[in-house]
Amino acid sequence: MLSAGQLTSFLKKWWLPLLFCVVLPTAVVGSVIQRHSQFSPIDEQAHFDYVERLYSHGVPVLGDRLLPSTLCEIACRGTALPGIVTPPCDSATFTAKDFPGEGYQYQAQQPPLYYAFTAPIAKVVEKVVGLGPVGSARVIGVLLLIAGLLLSWHVAMMMKISRLTSLAGIAVMGLSPTVVYYSSIVTNDSAAILCGALVCYVAARTHIEQKSFVRHAVVVGIICAFVKSVCALPALILGGLFIALSIQRAGGIAVIKTKQSRQLWWKSHTAQTYGRTGVGFIVAVTASSLLWALFLRFSAGVSPLDLPTFQVLRARPTNLGVILSEATNMLYPLTGLYNPFQFWNQDVYNLLNSVGAFTLVAGCAAGIVISKRTWWSIAGPVALGGTYICGIGIAVMGWWVYRIGPDVVSRYALSLLPLLVLIVCAGIQRATAQKVFALGAFAFSAMSVWMIIQTPLV
């Protein structure tokens, strides 16, 4: 049992992290959940149906229809998207074909890990708190966000990043419009911050302890890939960086030209430290993604090309210019392209949008002009370039699999936020700059919260 002195010491050390990682995010996200009764247009009803059916009907496959209980929730709760027409709430029965998209469970394309985690906890929350099935499932997003923020804080302290800038960065990350919104609805995007923080944790331990954490990398890579494909992006970027770093330190590209040189490289200290961890990340993500893709292909009752839900996305033209332009949306993970707050506060939203993107891009790109090589000066440009390249890859994959026009949305970069924010915070070295950054970050956070809580939601 903690003594009074130990409790005082704990509170003195942790009250600020707890404030920014737990109390404020919970209050803001909880406020959005309370006032936002309708389903989000960002596929929330399909994600909710996945949660509801997983343990009773098994993993859904493409071609399944939404459960009658989900259809009833849609009809009675409504969807926050103009023009949606559903049968009346008091209908005796609900038929999937009478609903938008003919009632297909089009989120069956998603891996099951988030839903398998959410379903049992949501049932407990529903019994204890009485929030109803949708509200209880939404609460899981708050828990995942708290875990991601606390782990990001732990990584910052491991990497000896300034406490002030770390708190400021955590505040921006946890209170930004995109993070708050997608933590307040039923979606596997709510696990993105935690996935990114897990990857950063394994990478940080590898760098600090200078030894391989290949098993940790494999486990984390599998977790991220089976939460959502885009949640594995930090593992791919840092995995590639670690492999490149180990090759560079071992003598450059020449070390992989022959079988003998590759064997010597694989046994070298740099390969055992960085290379094997990097390979663990990439192999785990690639293998998991391929396994899930094979499952989707052989289990699907209909082709993704035949799902009515995706028809609306096929009207956009597809060419290289559009793809390159769409990929830039990955640089706006703090504000995103859709959240309900922007429509009521367009001027504030535009300001936050510009400031957030500029800070992340400038902070990560700063390493290019730094002569003294430090971890953040190397990781920054790689993470920034990797983020943009991943956006191009997402656009190409969307066209290849679904034949939809390039449609890269900012929430696909949510899992990269812990990495990008930690890099920015680490790069601010001087005391004066740290204070200026912290002041600006807290102002950004305060403006975000003001915009969020004064937005009328239904």
Image: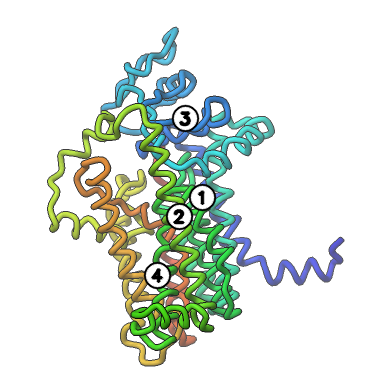
Residue 324 vertical position relative to residue 183 in the rendered view, above or below: below
Q: Quadrant of residue 441?
A: bottom left
Residue 178 or residue 443, whichever sits in front: 178
Which residue: 42% across, 81% down?
260
Q: Identity of the amino acid at label 3?
A: Asp
Residue tagged by mark 2?
A: 449
Q: Identity of the amino acid at label 2?
A: Val
Which residue: 28% across, 55% down?
347
Q: Secondary structure at mark 1?
A: helix
Q: How would you rate the neighbour count of disc 1 (Cα within 10 Å): few for under 14, some for 14-19, many for 20 or more?
A: many
Whether pointer 2 and pointer 1 mark residues with C-beta atoms closer than 8 Å, the reply is yes
Residue 1 vertical position relative to residue 49 in the rendered view, above or below: below
Q: Identity of the amino acid at label 4?
A: Gly
Return the x and y of residue 358 as percentages of the image width and height. Answer: 31, 69
Going from N to C along the chain, the mark reached first, 4 or 1, is: 1
Residue 142 or residue 407, whichever sits in front: 407
- Quarter of the N terminus within the rendering: bottom right
Residue tagged by mark 1?
A: 28
Q: CA distance from mark 3 to mark 4?
A: 36 Å
Return the x and y of residue 194 as percentages of the image width and height. Answer: 52, 56
Residue 126 as seen in the image, left or right of residue 39: right
Q: Secondary structure at mark 4?
A: helix
Residue furthest to the top: 92
Going from N to C along the chain, the mark reached first, 2 or 3, is: 3
Q: How would you rate the neighbour count of disc 3 (Cα within 10 Å): few for under 14, some for 14-19, many for 20 or more?
A: many
Residue tagged by mark 3?
A: 49
Going from N to C along the chain, the mark reached first, 2 or 1, is: 1
